[in-house]
Amino acid sequence: MSIIPSPLRNLVERLLVPIVTALIRARVSPNAITTWSTAVVLGSGIAFGVGMIQLGGALLLLSGIGDMLDGRVARAGARVTPFGAFYDSTLDRIGDAALFGGIAVYFTRGGVPPHLVTWSLLAALVALSATLIVSYARARAEGLSLDCQVGIAQRAERILGLGVPSLFIGAGPDGLVLLGIVAVLAALSAVTVAQRIAHVRALTRGSTPAGEGRRPARATQARQLTSELGEFTNERNRK
């Protein structure tokens, strides 16, 4: 389930094809794209922190383009590597921390009225924590060979949900627009965590607990050993 309509997703996919092709022909490394995208989102976090909200939104959306390109270039160019997957995932988490950290700094530097500072910091903390857990849940599931690309607030939704309003509206009066966006993202990310837990629970329901499948084999081996010892003893007695 995704809040981004399928026609929009398909349109973006078609628009990215020539860019991916050009990057492959130019022999641009997927890891280089990942690094560039992370540098841009770090700039976004800094922009949010110093109160340049619209610039922060623009840089966030720009980083999202790089985030969509690195994996596609790796797959289409046959350059998928374990390190590339690890590198991409790690730098994504660094970018998330920088982004919400910058927003939290903005809230503490007078971005919202004094009586809302505590609530705004709580919203930013929950948004960051839930975002990290969403990503961890997918990585852990994939480590168990399970697909876990579910949830209403995946990475693309979070980037668009924060980047577009920030670019066109800014923080709003007393920072209330930005605070509202962060609070909504926090709630949607928390829901996504629950969705991924439920999804993996459904996929693994009825599976054999770890170690249980080895018990019958061990019992059989014990019986065989006992039988062989008995035969050996009987043979010695006959002699």
Image: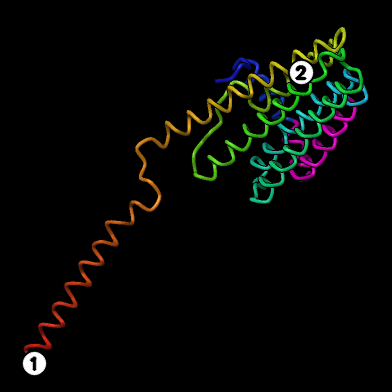
Image quadrant for the N terminus? top right
Q: Tag 2 or tag 1, which sits nearer the N-term?
A: 2
Q: Residue 48: x percent and y percent?
A: 87, 24
Q: Position of residue 82 (x, y in %)?
A: 64, 50
Chief SS of the magenta region: helix
Q: Secondary structure at mark 2?
A: helix
Among the 4 quarters of the image, the one containing residue 60: top right
Q: Where is 45 relative to 34, above or below?
A: above
Residue lying at the far left of the rendered structure:
238
From the image, tell me which residue sits under label 1.
Answer: 239
Can you see residue 44? yes
Q: Which mark is residue 73?
A: none
Residue 170 visible to the viewer: no
Say which residue appears at 16% left-offset and 82% top-offset.
Answer: 232
Circle 2 crowding by C-alpha within 10 Å: few under 14, some 14–19, many from 20: some
Tell me what residue is drawn at x 85 percent, y 9 percent.
172
- Residue 176 at what x, y percent from top left? 81, 10
Residue 55 is left or right of residue 189, and the answer is right
Is 112 placed left or right of 119 in the picture?
right
Q: Quadrant of residue 118?
A: top right
Quadrant containing the C terminus is bottom left
Residues drawn in magenta: 19-47
Q: Is residue 158 above or below residue 132?
A: above
Label 2 belongs to which residue?
A: 119
**Which residue is at a point 73% across and 30% down the rendered structure image?**
18
Three-letter code for the amino acid on which mark 2 is drawn:
Trp
Q: Secondary structure at mark 1?
A: loop
